[in-house]
Structure formats: structure tokens, C-alpha cells
Amino acid sequence: VVAWNTVTLEPVTDMNNYAIDVTGLTDSTVYINLDNIDFGGIANGGVKLSMRADQTVVFNTQATTFKIPRYSVNIVGNLSNAEVAENIIWNIPKATSLIIESDGLHATVIAPLADTYIATTGEGNLVCNKVTGNGGEWHFISRRVPEPTPTPTPIPPKYGELTLSKEVVGLEEGAEWS
């Protein structure tokens, strides 16, 4: 059984320290609605997420233009970068313009309609319409990439023997044929 909860965030009061702490929730999946938060009013690096290693945090917004700011993550427990990328999800289904400014981001970003500008380097999973950038990179990381199945080397077919013989009809025996 997967428990989940939708969290409504408090208004921004400190642009340099906007804490989102879900560690006290018993839920394994936490949905956070960003539509009522002025992310533009938070300084880059001002968002601080705290979560447990057994939690998945899904940030949801219906915005058509959105910027993922630089933020920090404090995880109670241990997760690899690939696990963090699977456990932090940015769901931005209506965005047609997306800017990723979070340096060192490990996340899954779902914005299938968005022309996405990558300003810094991040890694995880990215679903978008188009990617551009200036000095930034996106690295695909996942624990779920299947091992390739080796292609067997084909065995060459075996061919039977072929015997040819020549018979000339209409010549007398011993006559030369040319």
C-alpha cells in the first residue's frame, strides 16, 4: 500500500530560506502543489527540501512558464544520485517554456510540451519538447536501464555438395567440341 499526501505550502516569508520539510509525514509519496507559491520571489538556492530516503516528492504545477530554481536537498538516509533523480519529480505538464537553473539537480522533470533551456548541469530523467542551453548539460541517469541482451553470433549455414557434369548431345564420340 502506497500512502500519499498533498502538501499545500506556506507563503514565502524569507526569500533566502524557504524550507520544505516532509520528513515528519508518514506518507511514502508526497505531492506538493506549487501553483500558489511565487517561486520568482525565492532567491536561487533559497529552497531547501528535506525528505526521507523512503519518500518520493512530486512537485506539481499547471504553469505554462516555469523556472526550476537552484535548491538544496537534505535526505534522511542514503540515496545514490540515480535514486534521488527517481525520488524527486517535477511534474509540469502544461509548461511550454521551462528554465532549469538548479546546478547539480538530480530529478525527473516531466514537461512534455516545454521548450527547455538548461542553464546549468543536471542529471536524471528529462521529458520535454526541445532542449537548448548555454553552458549547461543534462546527463541521463537511471537504475532501471536494462542490461543489453547479447546478440548471438549467427552460425553460417552449411551447404551440400554440388557436382557438375557436362554432356554434349549430337556429336560423335571422340569428336572435339568447341
Image: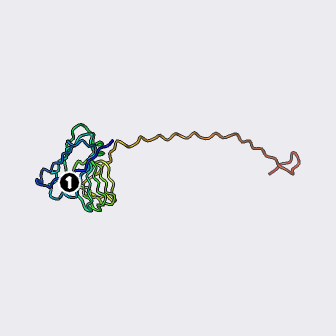
Crowd band around label 1 with a 10 angstrom C-alpha radius: few (<14), some (14–19), many (20+): many
Q: How is the image coloured?
A: rainbow
Q: Residue furthest left?
A: 14
Residue at 30% x, 61% y: name it.
94
The percent position of residue 145, horizontal first and vertical second, equals: 38, 43
Taking depth in this image into account, of 139 and 115 the one nearest to the observer is 115
The location of residue 158, given as percent across then percent down, is 64, 39
Q: Position of residue 35 (x, y in %)?
A: 22, 58
| Figure label count | 1
Q: Residue at x 81, y 47 (%)?
A: 167
State whether residue 46 appears in this view. yes
> Type of residue at label 1?
Pro
Q: Which residue is mark 1?
A: 69
Q: Can residue 121 be seen by looking at this rendering?
A: no
Quadrant in the rendering for residue 77: top left
Instruction: Pick out the residue farthest to the top.
Output: 77
Q: Of residues 38 and 124, which is closer to you in this image?
A: 38
Residue farthest toward the right in the current orientation of the protein: 172
- Left or right, 49 with respect to 137, comes to left
Q: Is residue 157 rendered to the left or right of residue 81?
A: right
